[in-house]
Image (tube, grey):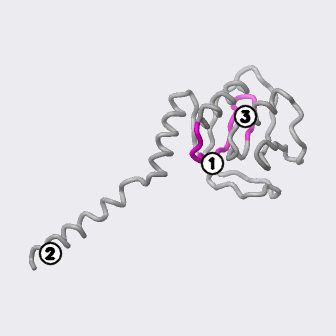
């Protein structure tokens, strides 16, 4: 009887340690973010103001991957309404063929791509998809 009481007390004392262990999803996100860092991308969690006309509400905060940009003065921002359909803030489709080809190569869970004079960034849902990070890194490099 005392054996079971001791086992119960030890189990109760050690159970909070299980809460400190990251879940599989958190471990996968950490690995993904470390791999992005090795590829030259930076990542931060950002709170975004999403357009009301998006079909699905993206998460908030959302993972924002970004890369520096030099020599460009153009600024633009596109949201993905449906996979492969990229619209600006006035709901006009992207008409630049070079830009559209890069945007359409991105995974379906990329919600937004934005470029400024100093940085290009995208908001991504980080769903497990084969070679998604490689496609993102290639698109950001091509557009930077």
| Sequence-wise first label, 1 or 3 | 3
Residue depicted at 78% across the width and 57% down the height = 55
- C-alpha separation, residue under disc 1 versus residue under disc 2: 46 Å
Most extreme residue toward the top, as rendered?
Answer: 71
Label 3, secondary structure: give it: loop
In which quadrant of the rendered view does residue 51 lie? bottom right
Q: Which residues are magenta?
A: 113-130
Label 2, secondary structure: give it: helix
In the rendered image of this protein, does residue 100 appear above or below residue 9? above
Front residue of 127 and 87: 127
Residue depicted at 29% across the width and 65% down the height = 15
Sort mark 1 into few (<14), some (14-19) or many (20+) by Cα contacts within 10 Å. Answer: some
Most extreme residue toward the bottom, as rendered?
Answer: 1
Sort mark 3 into few (<14), some (14-19) or many (20+) by Cα contacts within 10 Å. Answer: some
Q: Which mark is residue 105?
A: 3
108 horizontally vs 91: left or right: left
- C-alpha separation, residue under disc 2 versus residue under disc 3: 59 Å
Q: Which mark is residue 125?
A: 1
């Amino acid at each position: 009887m005392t054996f079971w009481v001791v086992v119960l007390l030890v189990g109760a004392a050690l159970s909070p340690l299980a809460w400190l262990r990251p879940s599989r999803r958190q471990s996968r996100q950490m690995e993904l973010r470390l791999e992005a860092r090795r590829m030259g991308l930076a990542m931060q969690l950002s709170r975004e103001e999403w357009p009301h006309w998006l079909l699905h509400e993206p998460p908030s905060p959302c993972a924002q991957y970004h890369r520096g940009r030099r020599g460009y003065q153009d600024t633009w921002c596109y949201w993905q309404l449906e996979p492969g359909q990229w619209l600006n803030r006035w709901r006009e489709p992207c008409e630049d063929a070079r830009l559209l080809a890069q945007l359409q190569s991105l995974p379906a869970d990329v919600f937004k791509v934005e470029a400024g004079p100093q940085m290009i960034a995208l908001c991504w849902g980080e769903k497990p998809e084969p070679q998604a990070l490689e496609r993102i890194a290639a698109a950001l490099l091509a557009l930077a």
